[in-house]
Image (spheres, rainbow, N blue to C red):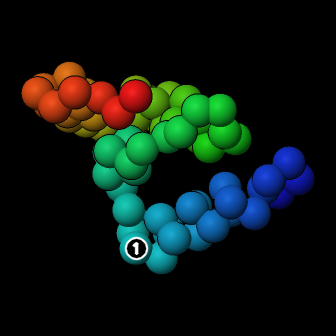
Amino acid sequence: MVAPEAASLAHILALAVERQTTVAQMLQMPFYHPTLEEGMETALHDAAANLGVAYRPEALMLCDSRTEEPLA
């Protein structure tokens, strides 16, 4: 793998393989901005669509259901 900060991406992928993580489970992980890992999120969405994998993107929107005030 050749990319800036590729070690982080390789670590996430190696951990996912070791834990036998599914595409749907990986899509439940947070993807921070701006990072190289955001590209992996795009690839996972594409893989999910091609594999017919059902996942719940609305589960990632839990912050919208919080009533606490954001930190300033």
Circle 1: residue type: Arg
Please provide percent x and percent y for residue 33: 58, 32
Q: In which quarter of the image is the C terminus?
A: top left
Side of 25 relative to 13 (left or right)? left
Side of 34 relative to 45 (left or right)? right
SS for dot 1? loop
Residue at x-position 48% and y-position 76%: 18
Residue located beneath label 1 in the image? 19
Relative to 42, is 17 above or below? below
Q: In which quarter of the image is residue 10?
A: bottom right
Q: Quadrant of the N terminus?
A: bottom right
Q: Compare residues 63 and 4 and report the one nearer the observer.
A: 63
Residue at x-position 78% and y-position 55%: 6
Q: Quadrant of residue 56?
A: top left
Residue at x-position 45% and y-position 30%: 45
Q: Compare residues 46 and 60 and report the one nearer the observer.
A: 60
Please provide percent x and percent y for residue 62: 20, 33
Q: Compare residues 48 and 29 and report the one nearer the observer.
A: 29
Please provide percent x and percent y for residue 24: 32, 45
Side of 5 relative to 47 (left or right)? right
Relative to 24, is 45 above or below? above
**Dot 1 surroundings within 10 Å: few (below 14), some, or many (20 or more)?**
few
Question: In this rendering, does residue 23 appear at all?
Answer: no
From this viewpoint, which residue is outermost toward the bottom? 18
From this viewpoint, which residue is outermost toward the front? 72
Residue at x-position 22% and y-position 27%: 69
